Image: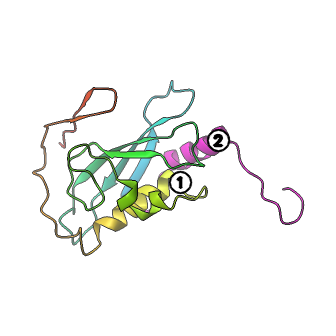
Amino acid sequence: MGPEGSTVIVPRSFRLLEELERGEKGIGDGTVSYGMDDADDVYMQSWTGTIIGPPNTVHEGRIYQLKLFCGHEYPEKPPTVIFQSRINMSCVNQETGVVEPSLFPMLADWQREYTMETILTQLKKEMTSPQNRKLTQPPEGNDEGRVDPKGLVLRCCIM
């Protein structure tokens, strides 16, 4: 630790390794998880997250897949978060699946201490909010696919 009153800033790579280790161990009740999308990604930019819909909402029992992209400025800047699974939520762009920072306070008011775990947990909590808990959802198994920024069609199939 630095001199009294100063803060030690953990380098990006150490921070991401810490998050990877935590993600591999599992989180809380198991309804939120995340990990690396590509083990060969030396920059640790591409991540996959999963949220199991909370009980007593229209999301109950549904499994939502997300992509999180941590650019070179992470954790100073938030990751880009995209739902691969179709979902109807007030903070999600219905065409692209992108969680809109201007509509999701955690991303709009990003703090370095936030993690991918806190994002996923907050998104799950947002599913229980009055404006989202009863919104009509797209049918499960909808495999219309989304186009990601690289032009690839992303498909999610719930089995």
Q: x and y percent of residue 133 in the render?
A: 22, 70
Q: Is residue 130 left or right of residue 17?
A: left
The three-letter amino acid code for the residue at tag 1 is Thr
Given residues 18 and 89, the one toward you in this image is: 89
Outermost residue, top direction?
40
| Real-space Cα separation, disc 1 to disc 2, in angstroms | 12 Å
Is the residue 148 above or below the residue 79 in the image? Answer: above
Q: x and y percent of residue 116 in the render?
A: 49, 51
Residue 30 appears in view: no
Q: Residue at x 35, y 53 (%)?
A: 100
Q: Is residue 82 left or right of residue 112?
A: left
The three-letter amino acid code for the residue at tag 2 is Arg
Given residues 1 and 7, the one toward you in this image is: 7
Q: x and y percent of residue 54 in the render?
A: 28, 65
**Residue 12, labelled with which disc?**
2
Span shown in magenta: 1-29
Q: Is residue 14 left or right of residue 42?
A: right
- Image quadrant holding the C terminus, namely top left
Q: Residue at x 56, y 47 (%)?
A: 19
Q: Residue at x 17, y 70 (%)?
A: 134
Q: Image quadrant of residue 80?
A: top left
Q: Secondary structure beneath disc 2?
A: helix
Given residues 138 and 80, the one toward you in this image is: 80
Residue 25 magenta: yes
Residue assigned mark 1: 115
Residue 22 appears in view: yes
Q: Residue at x 24, y 60 (%)?
A: 89
Q: Residues within 10 Å of mark 1 (few under 14, many from 20)?
A: some
Q: Secondary structure beneath disc 1?
A: loop
